[in-house]
Amino acid sequence: MSAPVAIGVAWRQVRDRFRAAGLDTPELDARLLAQTAFGLDAMGLVRRERQAATPEQLVELDRFALRRLAGEPVSRIAGEQEFWGLRFALSDATLVPRPETEQLVEEALARLAGQRAPRIVDLGTGSGAIIVSILEALPKARGFATDISEAALATARQNAERHGVAARLDVRQGAWWQAVPHTELFDLIVSNPPYIATAAIAELAPEVRVFDPKVALDGGWDGLEAYRAIASQAARRLVPKGQMLLEIGYNQAEAVRRVFSRAGFGRVEILKDLAGLDRVVVASHS
Ligand SMILES: C[S@@+](CC[C@H](N)C(=O)[O-])C[C@H]1O[C@@H](n2cnc3c(N)ncnc32)[C@H](O)[C@@H]1O
């Protein structure tokens, strides 16, 4: 029988394998995978440093390490990603929510401040990261979440339960507005739709191209198909003072502005992200 291996030794061995392989963040990746393999949070991993790992845990950690060395992102392996300070479960059908998308949540909360019981729809909700974060922050708000992928919606429901907002979130499958009854009007529409042009998908980093679902990335021949579909009904789905917030690709601001101006929005504004890139389009009636 081999000697027991301490948890602290096990994760550092993984870190060293990741370093040797030239991964960008070997220590962070090793810690995060070890937390999942050992069922610990960040503090637990420190506190249980000297505790012996079980053989099963070591086998699991080794499997995780091999997946990471084969290029799979840590969040996919761990099945979770933090977003807006909350932990979101992921599945094969969901995009890993990106830190830049937190700007949509921040803008949404700023614009809804002072409204008593706002109604919000999130089109193409994926893991539910955007709408669940908004509802979690606004206890009187109600939400609607749609996606073409029923499998993604199962994960969104799971995340809504996890963060205690499921009773205020209506989750429905369908293409963009098809899933939303015509009688529903919203104070805010949010969406981070697929916006990569089909031909550009082949040029994405393997972590994205191989592991994010294609339906979550592919915005059609010019990357704008989802914006056109959303714009086709957005103006009549908003209350008079309602607003629409959309994430965009860094080079799409003017094209998306045109789509929404043509669709009847009197005011279309572009917001930049922290890196100074065009990131969010805000459209409203006036
Ligand atoms: C870029 S991902 C965003 C996911 C999530 N909102 C986020 O920010 O992490 C786009 C989402 O749109 C969904 N989607 C793609 N085509 C759709 C369609 N025709 N109707 C509704 N949702 C669609 C995908 O399944 C995916 O979940």
Image (tube, rainbow, N blue to C red):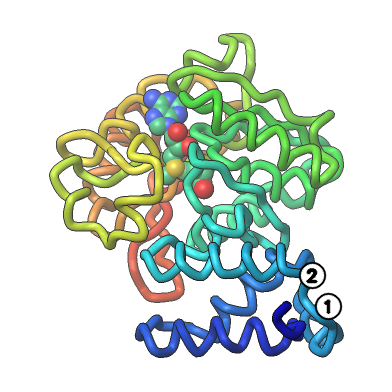
Q: How many marks can you see? A: 2
Residue extending farthest to the top is 182
User: Residue under circle 1?
Assistant: 44
> On screen, 121 above or below 70?
above
Quadrant containing the N terminus is bottom right
Q: Do the residues bearing badges 2 and 1 touch, measured as CB atoms within 8 Å?
A: yes
Q: Residues within 10 Å of mark 1 (few under 14, many from 20)?
A: few
Q: Position of residue 173 (x, y in %)?
A: 55, 19
User: Residue under circle 2?
Assistant: 40
Relative placement, left or right, of 231 versus 155 is left
> On screen, 28 above or below 89?
below
Task: Kindly report the distance in space between the C-alpha atoms of the residues bearing marks 2 and 1.
Answer: 5 Å
Q: Residue at x 45, y 82 (%)?
A: 18
Can residue 234 be seen in the rendering of this structure? no
Question: For the residue labelled by badge 2, is the local secondary structure a helix, a strand or a loop?
Answer: loop
Of the four image quadrants, the one with ligand 1 is top left
Relative placement, left or right, of 153 versus 65 is right
- Amino acid at dot 2: Leu
Q: Position of residue 66 (x, y in %)?
A: 46, 67
Q: Quadrant of residue 256?
A: top left
Q: Residues within 10 Å of mark 2 (few under 14, many from 20)?
A: some
Q: Position of residue 268 (x, y in %)?
A: 38, 45
Q: Residue at x 39, y 89 (%)?
A: 20
Residue 55, disc: none
- Amino acid at dot 1: Gly
Q: Residue at x 59, y 11 (%)?
A: 181
Can residue 205 be seen in the rendering of this structure? yes
Q: Position of residue 89 (x, y in %)?
A: 65, 48
> On screen, 125 above or below 65?
above
Residue extending farthest to the front is 1
Question: For the residue labelled by badge 1, is the local secondary structure a helix, a strand or a loop?
Answer: helix
Q: Quadrant of residue 250?
A: bottom left
